Image: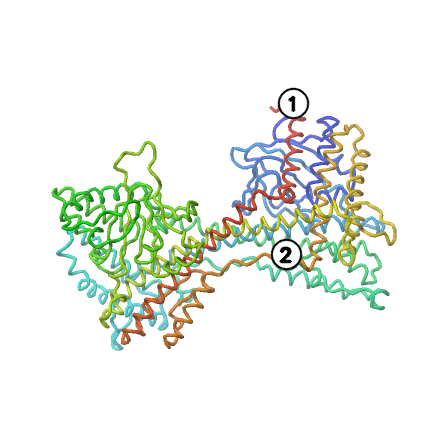
Amino acid sequence: MNWQYNQYYPLAQAGPNARALGEALLQAYPLTRSCLLVLGPKLVETVQFGYFQAGHEIIKEGEKGKDLYLLCEGGVDVLVGGKIVVNMKGPTLLGDKGIVETDSTRAATIKVAKAQVCLFLKIPMDLFIKDFKSQAADGLFAQETAIFAAMFLTIQDRLFTYMNHQKTMWEEVNSTLNLLNTKLIAKSLENQKPLNWDPNAWGHAKRQVFKLIGFKWPDNLEANPANLYQLLAKFLSTKTAPLKTRLSPAEFTAARQRLWQGWLEEIARGVLKHLPKKALPIDIGEIELFNPKLFRVKLLTLVRTFEKKFPPSEAAQKGLVSLKAEDHFGKGQKVNFLELFPYLEAFDRACKIPRPNWIKAMLAQKTAQIAAKSENEFNGSLVRMQEFLERVKGMTVNLGPAQVEKKLDTAQVNKAAKDLVRSYDAFFRNVEAPVGRRLGEIYFQPDETPRLEDLIKISGSKIIRQQIETAFGSITQALKLVVPNLPVTVMEKMLRIFRASPGDCLNPSELALNYWTPISSGASLVQGKRELFFLKSGTLLGGSAWKNLLDNEKAKALSIKVPPKGENEPPDTYYCFFCLPKSVLPWNHETLDPNQIAGQYTLILQWLTERMLGFLAELAEERDEHYEKWVKAEMITDLEKRVQDFENLPREIDGEAGKALGLYLTELGLTLAPGEPLVSAQVSKSVYNHLVREIKANNPALGVNEVGNQAYTKFRLHLTEMVELIKSYDSNRPKVADKTEVYQVLEDQIRRLFLRLKQPIQESYFSLGLAAKPMISIGSIAKDMETKPDMFRRFAQDFLSLLEQVQINLILETDDYHQKVSQIRSLRSQYDLESLQAQAVNDGVRKLQTLLGPGLS
């Protein structure tokens, strides 16, 4: 038969088997399955289907309707106020909130996404849900109770699932807003525009000036943009004067501008967080994130209101039953999830209710309304955040990902690295007493590991010398291997260049002596012969903490490995590494210049700190990815064992778990004899046989195989739900180990370091454990140690050792979770409820599409 696009047809028109397939699809979702249990075959008889093209609106915001839609295949956009809030792909259920609204007004538009053709099933719930003003018998409202309760649970689950999406966007908005305001304030300072700053803000600006240039603002000098500009300009000229003799006019201008812009933005950043909203150049306004705790409070307030309306039942008066709403919320990560079905049963037993089904239906609808309203507010906040992000894209200040963090041009860095090591052979021919090379190793020897100036000196051609110098500058700028606010010559003298061959290895013993960073791409961190992960160019590793690995059997196998030579690679394939010898770091010398503690020493230590914190952040992200996979795998493995035990072992389910299971079986349609023990294996068999009988009765035309397949699919879903239900009452269920809170550990260790140094800790020193962006202010610390060079030396050495050790521990923890995931992957359970549900729907969709055939026009 020919089906037209963008219109619905009764499912029965597709043939005698369509009804059974439609029912199988509805069985896959808790909401529609509950509706089926309540409404039975008459629900399936009303289902319609249709194919819809890109741009077609399935649901329109503001219209009234209670119909449900099952998106079988394709993708849709969810729009609020004309703005896309989220994209959703099939299979998924849509339109559920229209059921619970008092006036059934649609809160969002559902539109078929671009380049998509979607297959929908339409479920006309308007035909079945009774009005509460109806005079129907109380027992008839049991179906509304089941439908509204299932609706609440569906929305609640979706709300918590998409909560992270909102948080991610909120972080993007905050980051963009801070960057935008920083640049706008810096621009205002540069243009000497009047600023709406109070004395407190100017106080912070003065402190930033002192931090940057060491100038204490005089009391008799008015705080205004013009004076600030003139003051900074004067110091800028003094600061950059030595660069005139070393740089070309263009390079000098660029370096001067970078320093100037850096100063202005640093002042802007220091003042920004102390400005009231009215003084901000731009503000997004009030946007609230979804608060799961508040969601719980609203639900508790609602159910307690209902409880107070009715006197206690006789059983409650005798103390045989009690009603405590808090007991019906989940535990752990689901502490704010209301388990509504068990609560409604407890409410019915504990209160004397004249029309219990009518009241429970009304209560269930109210809970669903709370969930729906929360989701509408949630969607509204997403729209406002999206509008803000779109608005700032059109502003003249440079924003966006490319400006926030410029993407590394790997090809350019690799080319520069190749140019840099081009004169390596010439260098070895010219050294006075070359030591025999240690083949296969990456190592530092003062006479064998040249500085930039060493390579330049031995290069006979001016063109090659310029190429080498340009290559070095290109690498250090791209990989941020320069210390801000210090002349580039400082790092040129400190960094050593090593040319590695394919297959070379950098061992822990060498990493313990110096800091190393791969320049050419391709190097990886390995343990023995097992690769852990690739290292980004510019990643800084090493330090004295690596010495501790030599006594650790597992850790001492860590090393940095250059990939072996490929078949098609030329014979002169090399890899470039930079070495930062520990001997060049000032705090490793016997004496320190007190005048440099708050200057050059601080800048170098701050740079090292930020490099290490940056790598810690990358490691933590990698660790978290493996950890989350492991946690999920552990939960699935535990569920698999429980499912197998439930199905195969004759274990009696008693106590509260037994009562909950009994309620579940009753809702499923199984009648239990009074006092009949619930034995898991027998329950499994009874459920399966019940499903077989039910499918046969409703679909007499189905063959034995189809009946068996459908019954088994439903059985696995129910089996998993029963096991999860019983597990929720198991106080001995296994708990997953928590991952290490890296920054909290680091903060604790730094605090102990200050105790050893007998140095009071100031608030400005660091913000790690609970900070959104970890920060350590070496400048603030060094300022208080300026007159104590020995203390600063001990602090720098011990502090870096702490950072190095935390880095190593996180590497090992990341690898540990990676291995756990690898080991458990082969045991991944087939009983993952979401996967099983999606599989059941997809199987049904494929069969339905086959049945419908290609007849589209």
Secondary structure beneath disc 2?
Answer: loop
Camera-side residue of 355 and 462: 462
Residue highlighted by disc 2:
734
Task: Pick the residue in front: 135 or 603.
Answer: 603
Could you tell me if residue 374 is visible in this image? yes
In the image, 491 versus 502, the foreground residue is 502
Residue 505 screen position, x and y as percent: 33, 47
Query: Between marks 2 and 1, how big is the CA–CA gap?
Result: 55 Å
Along the horizontal axis of the image, is 857 left or right of 431?
right
Relative to 21, is 113 on the left or the right? left
Q: Residue furthest right?
A: 674
User: How would you rate the neighbour count of disc 1 (Cα within 10 Å): few for under 14, some for 14-19, many for 20 or more?
Assistant: few
Kindly identify which numbered label has been placed on residue 2.
1
- Sequence order check, earlier mark of 2 and 1: 1
Image position, residue 249 (x, y; %): 15, 52
Looking at the rendered structure, the kind of residue marked 1 is Asn
Residue located at (32% from left, 43% from top):
410
Check the image and report above or below for 548 versus 82: below
Residue 593, horizontal then vertical, whole percent: 22, 71
Write the residue at 73% across / 26% down: 15
Q: Tell me if 587 is positioned left or right of 317 in this view.
A: left
Q: Nearer the viewer, residue 508 or 60?
A: 508
Callout 1: SS: loop
